Amino acid sequence: MKRVLITGASGFVGSWLLKTAPGNVEILAQYHQRKIPFLPPHAAALQLNLLQPDWKRALAFEPKVILHCAALASPESCEAQPEAAQQINFSAAAQLCDLAVQIGARLIFTSTDLVYGGARGCYSESDPPQPINVYTRAKVEAERYILANHPDAVAARCALVYGRSLHGQPTFTETVIERLRRGEPVALFCDEYRTPVPVDALAAALWELAGNEFTGILNLGGAEKVSRYDMGRIICETLSLPESLLLPRKIVEMRFAAARAPDCSLDVSLARRVLTTPLPGFAKGITRILG
Ligand SMILES: NC(=O)c1ccc[n+]([C@@H]2O[C@H](COP(=O)([O-])OP(=O)(O)OC[C@H]3O[C@@H](n4cnc5c(N)ncnc54)[C@H](OP(=O)(O)O)[C@@H]3O)[C@@H](O)[C@H]2O)c1
């Protein structure tokens, strides 16, 4: 049975990795403050703070693969706590990389589409990153460290992730649906584009990467470039909810601490070639989830 360490197993993506774990893996699931929603058979939980990590138990587990999802994943939180962000998103990732090299474990690092900066869109893996805030600077630094030091590693640049929450914190799509169902207006950006990916498809792609031999940078996004306003429109169509409640907003109208990336849509042709996991566009993905 293959041993897999999943970090961030109490988070949105990590909890789906647990839910969709193949039956033939033994898992050590790291969390910090939130309880892991459920553990599949052959899984144990490990509480560990990446600000003061003690990797002893992880080392003793001797994982063959590490799926690294623990992060300070919100650009706004990173801007508010730059030192913690650097420690969690870069230093801990670099330490985990050294550990992976030491024990011969394959490392799948979850990075972000936001590393591209968003000036142009439709980015392929060969486009240079242009980090524009604390979050993306730490992610780019971590990617560079990992790819320079670990010969069996992947930097998976994940797009905006959507779908059902298992970890007790409502997701963007769940919040939009809830508000629309209550008849409340929802303000959404109409000038910020991504290629969102459903969380179950992302988890399947990460599991596939855990088991194949691809190394390097890989974009993992859905097949359709949309704005958050487009996502709201598609949700309204799918659930027959009133589109009149959607309020289009421009980035300049809102104030954020972290700089925003206008178009971080991904070219996912490499993922289509190296993976068998389908990565559907938003309309298809949300229909499947809500259906
Ligand atoms: N969600 C998206 O749309 C998206 C898009 C692109 C890339 N990504 C990347 O995908 C990965 C997973 O994101 P996510 O949405 O699942 O994030 P999330 O829901 O915020 O989960 C983050 C995880 O990291 C753990 N964590 C945070 N601070 C920690 C600390 N000091 N010590 C130990 N663990 C800590 C959390 O543990 P506790 O909750 O137990 O404290 C949680 O398990 C991240 O690398 C993120 O950058 C996400």
Image (cartoon, helix red, strand yellow):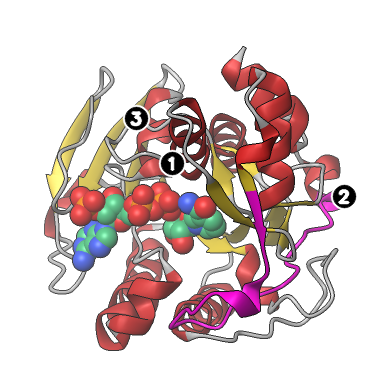
Amino acid beneath label 2: Ser
Give the alpha-carbon distance from disc 2 to disc 1, as whole Å.
27 Å
Give the alpha-carbon distance from disc 3 to disc 1, as whole Å.
10 Å
Q: Quadrant of residue 209?
A: top right
Magenta region: 247-270
Dot 2 corresponds to which residue?
A: 269
| Within-10-Å neighbours for mark 1: few <14, some 14–19, many 20+ | some
Of the pair 156 and 58, the residue shown nearer to us: 156
204 vs 26, left or right, is: right
Q: Is residue 155 above or below residue 246?
A: below
* Residue furthest top in the image: 291
Q: Which mark is residue 166?
A: 3
Q: Is residue 266 above or below residue 79?
A: above
Give the residue at x 83% y 52%: 270
Q: In terms of secondary structure, where does tag 2 sit? A: helix
Give the residue at x 28% y 80%: 87
60 vs 288, left or right, is: left
Q: Earlier in the sequence, mark 3 or mark 1?
A: 3
Whether residue 68 is visible to the viewer of this picture, yes or no, is no
Q: Position of residue 189 (x, y in %)?
A: 65, 60
Of the pair 69 and 77, the residue shown nearer to us: 77
| Within-10-Å neighbours for mark 2: few <14, some 14–19, many 20+ | some
Amino acid beneath label 1: Thr
Amino acid beneath label 3: Leu
Dot 1 corresponds to which residue?
A: 171
